[in-house]
Structure formats: structure tokens, C-alpha cells
Amino acid sequence: MRLLLDRAEEIVAQVALCLIAVCVFAQVVSRYVFSTAITWTEELAGFAMVWAVYMGAAVAVRDRFHIRILFAVESLPRPLALAAILVGDLLWIGFCSLMLVVGWEYISLLWQREFISPSLGIDQKWPQSIVIIGYVAIILRALQLYVRWFAGGRVGLPGITPPPHSEAVAKDGADAR
């Protein structure tokens, strides 16, 4: 169960990417082999792409693969590097929180009125809920980095694996921070 929770966004993103590939392949075969179009594949692939992007963003935060110049940050003295990471993460969490509020307003509008997708015939509030789910996942993964960093004794920088030599120094009793 823990593996599922640790990899939930990754699994959803992978399923969404597979769904995109299947839909596009089915559309190509349908058009070029059978000279007809499957109308719902384009819409489903579009929804799946949005889900893949948001879940991929949460994976990027979890693994610290989002846009950041880590080489420059890691070359700074520890107090400055820590300040740069903290300020950047606070700004990122603030932005995601703002987008969560805006997303909530958007989803609230979809819950007030029925808005049916043309090809799939489903209510838009379900696929569009990724706006809320995505930003919540991103914020939780960012906070999880700090929980793990504090639990690990604040070695290295938050969410960034310390270099191997710092672990050896820490085991020798010296302060690796």
C-alpha cells in the first residue's frame, strides 16, 4: 500500500500516457485503414494529456526534477543554499495555493451547472477535477520533502540527497549541516 501511495501520481501519469498512445493509434488506424474517424478518441486523449501533465508535475516535485538550477544552489555556502531553496519552495507553494483557490472557483462553477463533453458525453466536472487534484498533490509532495528532511536530521538540503561524503562525515560524529 505504501508503494502505491508513494507512486500514485506516477501510476496515474503512466496510465494517462498509455491512454493517449492507444487513442492516437486507434484514430490513425481508423482514419487510414477504415476511412472513418472515432470521434471520442481525440477528446479522451485531450483529457488524458491534462491528467498526465498535472500528475507529472507532482512527480517532478516529489523527485526534485522541476525547474531549478541545483548546480548553482549547491555551490553556494549552506546557509545561502538553504535560504534559496526555502524561498523558492515557499514561492512555489504559494503559487500552487493560489492556483488551488482559482481552480476551486472553476470547479465550483462546473458543479453548479451541467456541462457535458460533446464526444464522450460525460460531465466536465469529472475530468476537470484534475486542477484541484493536481495542485493538492503538488503541495503535498512539496511539504513531504520537508517532513522527510526534518525527520532525517536536516542533513543536506531539503529534498536533495546529500553527497555520499557528507553521510560519511555525519557518521563520524561531525556536523554535516
Image (cartoon, rainbow, N blue to C red):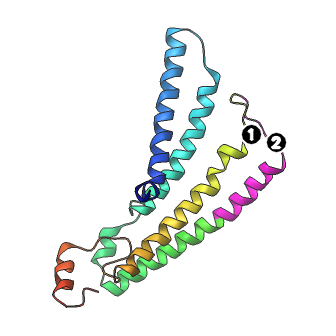
Tag 1 secondary structure = loop
| Mark 1: amino acid | Asp
Identified at 19% across, 90% down, the residue is: 173
**Residue 42's quadrant in the figure?**
top right
Residue 117 within the magenta-colored segment of the rendering: yes
Q: List the single residue furthest toward the top.
A: 34
Q: Nearer the viewer, residue 100 or 122?
A: 122
Query: Residue 131, percent across and down?
Result: 63, 54
Quadrant housing the C terminus: bottom left
Q: Position of residue 64 (x, y in %)?
A: 39, 64
Secondary element at image label 2: loop
Q: Which residue is drawn at the image coordinates 31% and 84% (left, top)?
A: 78
Residues marked 1 and 2 touching at CB (< 8 Å): yes
What predominant SS class does the magenta segment belong to? helix
Residue 35 vertical position relative to residue 47 in the rendered view, above or below: above
Q: Which quadrant holds residue 82?
A: bottom left
Q: Quadrant of the N terminus?
A: bottom left
Residue drawn at (43%, 71%) of the image: 145
Q: CA distance from mark 1 to mark 2?
A: 6 Å
Q: For residue 114, which numbered disc appears in the image?
A: 2
The residue pinned by badge 1 equals 123
Note whether 131 is above or below 27 in the view shown.
below
Q: Amino acid at mark 2?
A: Glu
Picture residue at 54% right of the left edge, 8% below the top: 34
Mark 1 nearby-residue class (10 Å; few <14, some 14–19, many ≥20): some
Q: Which residues, given as a range, are shown in magenta?
A: 99-118
Residue extending furthest toward the front: 1
Q: Callout 2: 10 Å neighbours few (<14), some, many (20+)? A: few
22 in relation to 164, above or below: above
